[in-house]
């Protein structure tokens, strides 16, 4: 399967998990904890695999400075998510900052998804052929499995 299709699938899954998280009450601390952990694991694996496969291939091929900057913005947005994840992982679940940080992470990820699917995927399709996208898809899935839980 083509890497961009796999990436979109992951995006849909993480958005659904964020929606579920937002629907949980303050009393559902155990469910929130489990779901937050699942969201974080999914994001870490996705971001790393995406950077190692799709982003690396597109960055190598882009010709224009504008397109290169757009790809680099994607890397930076992953960095922002990783910084928030690091803060969330050390936040006490009873602390109001836990939910606030998860909310900011959701907003950041949703912004990134929107830009990535509308801009970076278009660039990827212009510089990579179908065979390359399919090969990257296999590498993407493999790379996700290599990320420690």
Image (tube, rainbow, N blue to C red):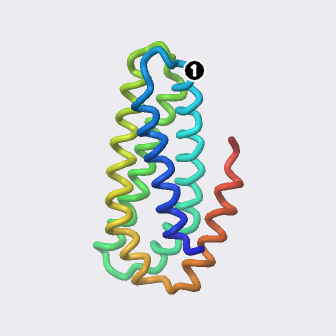
If the image is split into quadrants, where does the N terminus sit?
Answer: bottom right
Crowding around mark 1 (Cα neighbors within 10 Å: few <14, some 14 to 19, many 20+) is few
Q: Is 7 in front, or is 9?
A: 9
Q: Is residue 107 left or right of residue 130?
A: left
Q: Residue at x 49, y 36 (%)?
A: 85
Residue 109 location in percent, x, y?
39, 47
Q: Residue at x 53, y 47 (%)?
A: 43
Return the residue at label 1. Answer: 30
If the image is split into quadrants, where does the C terminus sit?
Answer: top right
Residue 44 location in percent, x, y?
56, 46
Q: Is residue 76 above or below residue 50?
A: above
Q: Secondary structure at mark 1?
A: helix
Q: Quadrant of residue 22?
A: top left
Q: Residue at x 40, y 53 (%)?
A: 76
Q: Residue at x 65, y 69 (%)?
A: 139
Residue 53 location in percent, x, y?
57, 67
Q: Quadrant of residue 146?
A: bottom right
Q: Is residue 17 above or below residue 75?
A: above
Residue 9 location in percent, x, y?
51, 60
Figure label count: 1
Q: Is residue 119 left or right of residue 86?
A: left
Q: Residue furthest left?
A: 66
């Amino acid at each position: 399967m083509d890497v961009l299709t796999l990436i979109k699938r992951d995006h849909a899954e993480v958005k659904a998990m964020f929606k579920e998280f937002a629907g949980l009450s303050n009393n559902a601390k155990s469910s929130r904890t489990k779901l937050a952990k699942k969201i974080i694991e999914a994001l870490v694996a996705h971001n790393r695999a995406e950077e190692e496969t799709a982003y690396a291939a597109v960055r190598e091929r882009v010709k224009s400075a504008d397109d290169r900057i757009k790809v680099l913005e994607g890397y930076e947005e992953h960095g922002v998510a990783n910084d928030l994840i690091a803060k969330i992982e050390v936040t006490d679940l009873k602390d109001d900052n836990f939910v606030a940080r998860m909310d900011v992470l959701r907003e950041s990820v949703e912004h990134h998804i929107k830009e990535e699917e509308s801009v970076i995927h278009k660039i990827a399709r212009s510089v990579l052929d179908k065979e390359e996208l399919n090969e990257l898809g296999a590498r993407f899935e493999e790379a996700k499995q290599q990320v420690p839980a």
